Amino acid sequence: MKIVMVGTGYVGLVSGLCFAEFGFETLCVDKNQARLNGISKGVCPFFEPGLDDLLVKHLNLTKRFSLSNNLQESLKEANVVFITVGTPTKRLENEADLKAVHEVAKEIAENIINYCVVVIKSTVPVGTTRKIKEIISQKVSEDKFDIVSNPEFLSEGSAIKDFMRPDRVVIGTENKKSESIMQEIYNPLYLQETSIVLTTIESAEVIKYASNSFLATKISFINEVADLCETIGGNVLDVAKAMGLDKRIGEKFLHAGPGFGGSCFPKDVKAFSATAKKHDVELSIINAVNASNEARPIKIASRIKNRFNNKLEGIVIGILGLSFKPNTDDIRNSTSIIIANELYKSGAIIKCFDPYAMNNAKKVLPDLNYCNSVDEVCKGSSALIIATEWNEFKVFDLNKIKKLMKDPVIFDLRNIYNNEAVKDFGIEYHGVGQ
Ligand code: UGA
């Protein structure tokens, strides 16, 4: 069984290496030669815990993983071809941009020789998989290929675990032949009794968007409850804990914070709603989630500005964490970046630090002061914002922080610290929803 992944982005590279770990010969194809050169030296183009080790192992030791810039050649022996190229939100609309997916489909159509299964793993709106079938059918007879929807559920920072030990695998097919080939490549997961949902193509496409949108809804819900707690004197930590103990609700994704970011939730809630609208269905809950989340980091920045009577000119503010969540260097839709930018635009001098995401942040916000340590950020700052919950931000020596800062004020946007305990150090503390 030979597997080809088209696209060496986050999903393509993680999935390709994990299939190699399962024991399959896997080939990752990309047109970007510079990217391939980097990967072929054993360096992943992004930070994901454990991925460099898998890359070196399968590139050099098992040699089950290889790279190519030539899709035509790569297709010759492929049994399963995964499309894992990006689907960003279109600049002026809320729809997913399917240009790259369609281009790959056309190229596959030009080059299929032997029967293979074409799997859409990129997150695509309902109906796209059928559209890709149409594109390929224009060039290739239907007995030469089958089309499958197999959405990914990889979370940045824990992607390898999510692939190797998933809560479920979703496989949407049109016939038994392709279904059994997909079952074969996920056989290692069958053996560990993972739930594999075999369904139709349309259901698989909806499952992906509905899952991400539901998780996003939980986050926005608790964020609004946090706002209420702040006004009426409740504590969202107690509220979320007690809610989560009800098994029907569940404790996960009820952490109030600065809003959800990343390359998935913000894009997917917009695309889900846009797809529904095209079919005259109004996803009013999802629309509200999108609006609530877009407003959230701006609102948080306003609260910080209010603390300084909206006079930020010359005030030094420290920001810890720039990635959209810990264990990644990804800053796409990072609420930390949005907040940093808002405060910078209001005249604040921003000092910041992130263990992995500084190089990416420098590209979008070059005028911030990038520091080498937490101490350097704290020195002379009039406020410290903990924006991303990296582990190393969880064990501060608060005495030292207080001494380093000009004015000891902490905005803990991830509720890492205990309100009372921080206040005992003589530090002004602002959590979320407390
Ligand atoms: C998300 C999903 O969790 C994955 O299952 C999915 O496969 C992936 O999108 C995708 O579609 O590719 P990811 O974007 O990596 O994964 O990150 P999450 O851990 O889901 O966090 C998303 C955002 O929500 C982050 O900004 C995080 O800080 C925020 N969040 C999460 C909260 O504010 N509160 C929470 O309780 C949980």
Image (cartoon, grey):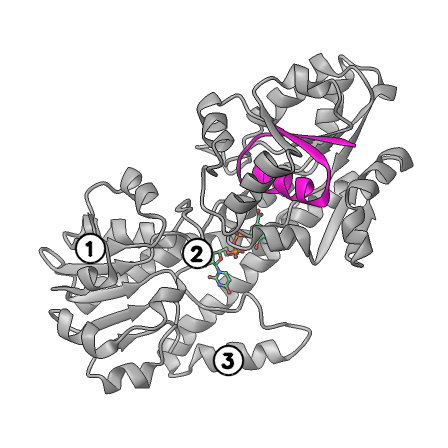
Q: Earlier in the sequence, mark 2 or mark 1?
A: 2
From what the image shows, is residue 19 above or below residue 376?
A: above
234 vs 2, nearest the viewer: 2
From what the image shows, is residue 42 above or below residue 101?
A: below
Residue, disc 3: 239
Mark 2 closeness class: few <14, some 14–19, many ≥20 residues within 10 Å? many
394 vs 225, nearest the viewer: 394
From what the image shows, is residue 372 above or below residue 22?
A: below
The reply to whether dot 2 and dot 1 touch (C-beta < 8 Å) is no
Q: Residue at x 62, y 40 (%)?
A: 17
Between the residue at mark 3 and the residue at mark 2, the CA separation in whole angstroms equals 23 Å
Looking at the rendered structure, the kind of residue marked 3 is: Val
Apparent side of residue 157 relative to residue 190 in the rendered image (left or right): left
**Residue 325: which disc?**
2
Quarter holding the C terminus? bottom left
Q: Residue at x 48, y 82 (%)?
A: 238
The stretch of residues the image draws in magenta is 1-28
Between the residue at mark 1 and the residue at mark 3, the CA separation in whole angstroms equals 34 Å
Residue at disc 2, CB closer than 8 Å to ligand 1: yes
289 vs 194, nearest the viewer: 194
Q: Is residue 247 highlighted in magenta? A: no
Q: Nearer the viewer, mark 3 or mark 2?
A: 2
Mark 1 closeness class: few <14, some 14–19, many ≥20 residues within 10 Å? many
Between the residue at mark 2 and the residue at mark 1, the CA separation in whole angstroms equals 19 Å
Q: Mark 2: which secondary structure?
A: loop
Mark 3 closeness class: few <14, some 14–19, many ≥20 residues within 10 Å? some
How far across and down, in percent of the image, does residue 110 sit?
70, 12
Q: Earlier in the sequence, mark 1 or mark 3?
A: 3
Apparent side of residue 287 relative to residue 406 in the rendered image (left or right): right
Q: Is residue 24 highlighted in magenta? A: yes
